[in-house]
Amino acid sequence: MVRPASIRSEKPQIGVVVGSHSGDQLRASTRVEIAHSQAPDEPLVSQALQGSREAFGLLVVRYSRSVRAVLVARLGACDDLDDLVQECFLRAYRGLSRLRTPERFGAYLHRIARNLAVDWLRRGPRGTVPLEDAPVVLDAPVEGLVDIREERLARVRRVVGRLPLALREAVMMFYFDRLSHGQIAAFLGITEGAVNQRLHRARVALRSALDGGGEEGS
Amino acid sequence: MSEHRDLRDALAPLAGDPVADAGRVLAALPELQPAAVRPARPMRLVAAAAGVALVVGAGVGWWLGRALPPAAPTAGWPSPTKETPGGRDPRNYGFEFFGFGTVQVVEPGTPPQELQNRWGLAYGSVLRTGKSHAGLLLRDDVQVRLDIGTHAEVVAPRSLVLQTGQIWLAARDAPQLVVVKTPSGLVDVERAVAMIEVRDGRVRVTCLQGQVRVRPRGAAAQRLAVGEQVAVDAGGQQVESCRPEFLDGISSWMTEMIVEQVDTRERDQRAARMVEAYLDGRFRKEARRELFRLGPAAVPALAGALRDHPELPPELARETARMVCSMATTRTKRPLFELLYSADPEVRVLVARRIGEVTDVPYPGGVEFWRGASDPKVRQSAVLEWWGRVR
């Protein structure tokens, strides 16, 4: 099939990582939208209310890691995590019309995720994996250092798992999604200063535990 | 090694894949009543009635559900065939091509053509990149990147021929191995990432992730672990075996493509690794060069490192601040503002000057104000005031 030169258009907007042939239509269709993910939530929420699945898909892409962070902070690496993330967004979709302040969609999702976690815990723990047993994938492990590194990361997760919930949640959001302090503050409904303080306290706790081996006996 | 990196590495495996999450959510949406998302008071009353009815009995609830008004039509996802350039669905016939510049492509049965954007191509296509780069997406999310001066053929979903040039091949989740044929033999990539280079009759293979098998012509096969590199001559004889010290350095030719990708994860991860290497010092020169290649995309990671490492030696901190300033644009001004909280007056002055340049909104007190702003409270109120003017 020969394409005339005139069909050639602007420089490519899409990289090879995002696409998929696996039948997942979202990967084929949200890539362009993801490029504009700096857009505010409000218009996306209104479009979703008008029936736009694309807009809601973009909101899912934007917030799924934050929701996951809230769930992991409360439940650890449980088997049902994917289902819970999905249920969180479905609940959000069902209740979207009741959202009075669309610009606070993040905080709205946070409440739903929190309630979901509480419901899940009420039903009794099933298939929960402590943080330290979660799988590790290193970017570029160096032979011989892998065991040491894995051991250290397991210790880090153990320390994070023992942090107070508020600190754990902030840490998860920051390191899952590389969100700014302002974005985390908006999602959690707290001030940027509080986020900063929580992250600082978490790092201090981590440093103290790792340097002094404090987490071993606790 | 900083707790910053420890936390990132320790928690990253739990972060999930937002695109996959969205796929699952959207797949479940059609089962919902779209009308439920439309604000309408009567609907809420009906829903409440339906809730009560559920308590009374499933039969009544079912009846109330039937009584709801029909669902309003919703906009569906564009069909894959409409999305695919040329109106062809790559799932049925071929693979996706992304040109980063003009690439000569010969599809089976067609004359050569020059492509420079996204297309669906048939298997059997031969590509010559010339002075451009190209990306390919094959079945099972196998990704291939082609360096400049590469001549390659995509024979089948799991079979490529590399005549000359260099490719990066990632088959992380492919259920079967992908075979690359070179003039010196075959390279098997299964659930792994590899770099393969053919120059002057010599083939060089580097394993970047997983395990890669090299099968030189007329010689025994060899397995490469992560970080290992082997070179084989045209006769299949191994001429070199080493372990590159700075593994990211050999993939620097891909940076342009990584920066242009819509999915920013790889770019951000690369920036974070380069910042680590830069601060570590062993490969500072190489990391610095790579950070400049990443350009504005590296600004948040670099500025974050400055913010999170107040213990850095002043010279290194200022050099880092100079890098941040030289790369920052108006779109990356936020990390610059965070650096105004720095305790180092030189860093503050550098940053204040750059913010004035990129935003065209200088601080009313002038750049020199920041040199003397030793009180953190004064700095904070000045930062907030300035941020309010430019945001």
Image (cartoon, coloured by chain):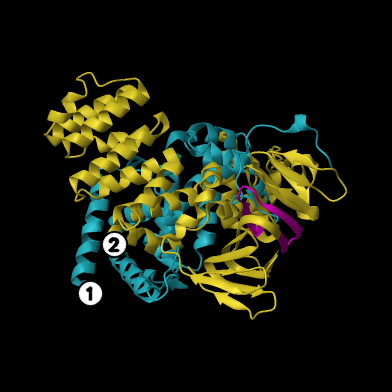
The residue located at (31%, 22%) in the rendering is B389
SS for dot 1: loop
- To which residue does mark 1 refer? A218
Q: Which mark is residue A209?
A: none
Residue B300 in the image, given as x and y percentages of width and height = 37, 42
A87 above or below A107?
Answer: below
Q: Nearer the viewer, residue B183 or A135?
A: B183
Q: Is residue B31 visible?
A: no
> Distance from label 1 to label 2 (Cα)?
24 Å
Residue B32 in the image, given as x and y percentages of width and height = 64, 48
Q: Colour of chain B?
A: yellow
Q: Is residue A33 left or right of residue A161?
A: right
Q: Is residue B164 visible?
A: yes
Chain to which mark 2 belongs? B
B142 in magenta: yes
A27 in magenta: no
- To which residue does mark 2 refer? B1
Q: Colour of chain A?
A: cyan
Q: Nearer the viewer, residue B91 or B198?
A: B198
Q: Nearer the viewer, residue B125 or A187?
A: B125
> Where the N terminus of chain B falls, by quadrant?
bottom left
Other-residue count near label 1 (Cα within 10 Å), few / some / many at <14 / 14–19 / ≥20: few
| Residue bounds of the magenta highlight | B141-161
